[in-house]
Image (cartoon, helix red, strand yellow):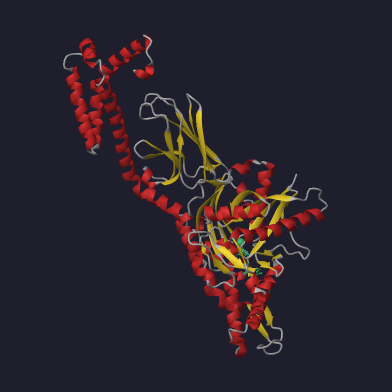
Amino acid sequence: MSRVVGIDLGTTNSLVAYVKDGAPMVIRDGAGDALVPSIVSIDDDGTIIVGREAQRRLLSAPGRTVYSVKRFMGQGVEDVQEASGLLPFGVGGDPGGVVRISVAGQEFTPPEISAFVLRELKRRAEEHFREQGEFDFEVDRAVITVPAYFNDAQRTATRDAGRLAGLDVLRIINEPTAASLAYGMASRDRGTIAVYDFGGGTFDVSILKVEDGVFQVLSTNGDTHLGGDDIDALLTAEVRRKIGGAAGDDSNDELIQAVRKAAIQAKRDLSSEEETELRLEPMAGAPAGYRQRMTRTDFERTILPLIERTLEPCRQALADAELGPSDIEEVILVGGSTRIPLVRRLVHELFGRQPHSELNPDEVVALGAAVQADILVSGRREMLLLDVTPLSLGIETMGGVMSKIILRNSTIPASGREMFTSYADNQTAVDVHVLQGERELVTDCRSLARFRLRGIPPMPAGMPRIEVQFQIDANGILSVSAKELRTSIEQTIEVKPAYGLTDEEVERMLIESFEHAETDIEARLLIEARNEAETVIHATEKSLCRPDFDQLAADALESGEPERITLALSAAKHALEGSDRDLILQTTEALNKATRHLAEVVMNRSVREALAGKNVRDV
Ligand code: ADP
Ligand code: MG
């Protein structure tokens, strides 16, 4: 059997992990380094270079080197205009199309660049297994993590990247969920978890609820342009100011990069030491053998405003989840920048509890992905219980009403079915309109797909038994099938719903559904009343129009009965012109009563005619 791994495909760093003898572990290179910088450089001869070596080329070959590609995954050209001006590589593409990255005279899509990183991780893992003397060292399946706020396009782009790298992506899971899994939170009966993820270029906070092994993201927030890079920039600027003179010259790239490198080293040192010395190699613009003592206190004073910028998104995420800091039972630190003691202190203060940091914050997401991968291949029960549908799914029924088949927050995989019928005589096809949303009316829901079930033999309205079945697989992919049970005619369609909306859209639709709940129900009740009225009116008119009606009335109806029926009929039709639901209900009920006897008479006659050799369909 081939190997399956868990991959954290990060903006700054990526890494791969697997479960060995029941425990997750990250795969390191010969030097003990687990992190592969998510940087890709294309050499003169077309060779693809990934990781640390590519990182060095950011300086030596900036026009051939791509970084931060995760920011462009699943994005359209319009989404990235603001970012593209600031990068050394070209970011463009056709209007309305996907982003294309031009580097070293070639064009790539973001998934292609990410695939280079994934291929490097796959290679590393295979090398690791081979060194372990394993016979089956091929790695062809993976679980890959994405930020919780990633939408369908971004998740699909990630899956595509995996496919391009020769990996069967078993599952895409949320980074905060992965971090929680790594900490064994799935075994909690219930709990609320805050995941604070401060990485290289982004800050994300997620509030999760876990119940019986099911994780649900209650809210996410963050800042897509706040991370360790900003700390580096701040520190670099400060050191340059201190050196003064030529160090302040913005065109002295070499010196700026040297200062940056020294600043990053000092930053890292100060996460474990109280004091460090920033040193510069002798070079143009730097005083010979420049040294600068730096204490953690100085450092913290410099970066405090920056770290404080992470607190507001945390408060917002709590508010969105309708929770206070004291409702949070576990706080998990993720991302290399949470190694900074000041960050830990502020997080501790905000949530009023010690955050988890027992696992390496830059490895914890990959460890969790490995746990999930292991759960999937070993077929343990929890695999079924990792996510929920964000919005209800259903189909359109008569009168433009959404009939829900799978309710929001159902754990996936999930399925549901409902029976429908035709509403016109001799209907040979029915349209199935698949919808997503919480509102009662179709016009307020999102249309996911439409398809047509054809080939139904002509039958009277209400006779066909059409079963519509919804099935969401573990990846959130919905398939819908419709089957006419009397004839076994069937149609199936695959729709992608669960992540088809951005989180904002999901949120907006949820809020609207609460706001509109009352008017929706009113509208729905009115539609139902109309449908009922129309059915009764239609049936009555059909009877009255029978060619043998006069004969039938003379034989079986009481005197005055036809007149009473006609009167009730016109009252019901009149009511139907307005939108007074009570009046529609009343007149329908009256018509129902007035025609009860007639219906019996017609039925008896039909049965007799059928027995006399006539076809039921002609009756
Ligand atoms: P991402 O999730 O964005 O890919 P990581 O979680 O790997 O990134 O975080 C990378 C960031 O963590 C970088 O800015 C790096 O400088 C920072 N970092 C790593 N180790 C430390 C440390 N010991 N102290 C402070 N910052 C660190
Ligand atoms: Mg990360």
Residue 496, relative to residue 194: is it above or below?
Answer: above
**What residue is rendered at 20% in x and 33% in y?**
574
Count of numbered labels shown in the rendering: 0
> Percent x, y for residue 342?
59, 71
Which residue is more in the foreground, 337 or 7? 7
Residue 133, relative to residue 474: is it above or below?
Answer: below
Specify the quadrant that holds the N terminus.
top right
Task: Mark yes or no: residue 399 visible.
Answer: yes
Task: Mark yes or no: residue 26 visible.
Answer: no
Horizontal placement of 614 versus 32: left or right? Answer: left
Horizontal placement of 294 versus 450: left or right? Answer: right
Residue 124, relative to residue 443: is it above or below?
Answer: below
> Percent x, y for residue 473?
57, 42
**What residue is rendered at 74% in x and 61% in y?**
28
Specify the quadrant that holds the C terminus.
top left
Horizontal placement of 96 versus 574: left or right? Answer: right
Which of the 4 quarters of the picture holds residue 375?
top right
Q: Ligand 1, what quadrant?
A: bottom right
Which residue is more in the foreground, 275 or 480? 480
**What residue is rendered at 60% in x and 79% in y?**
236
**What residue is rendered at 72% in x and 68% in y?**
45
Which residue is more in the foreground, 537 or 94? 94
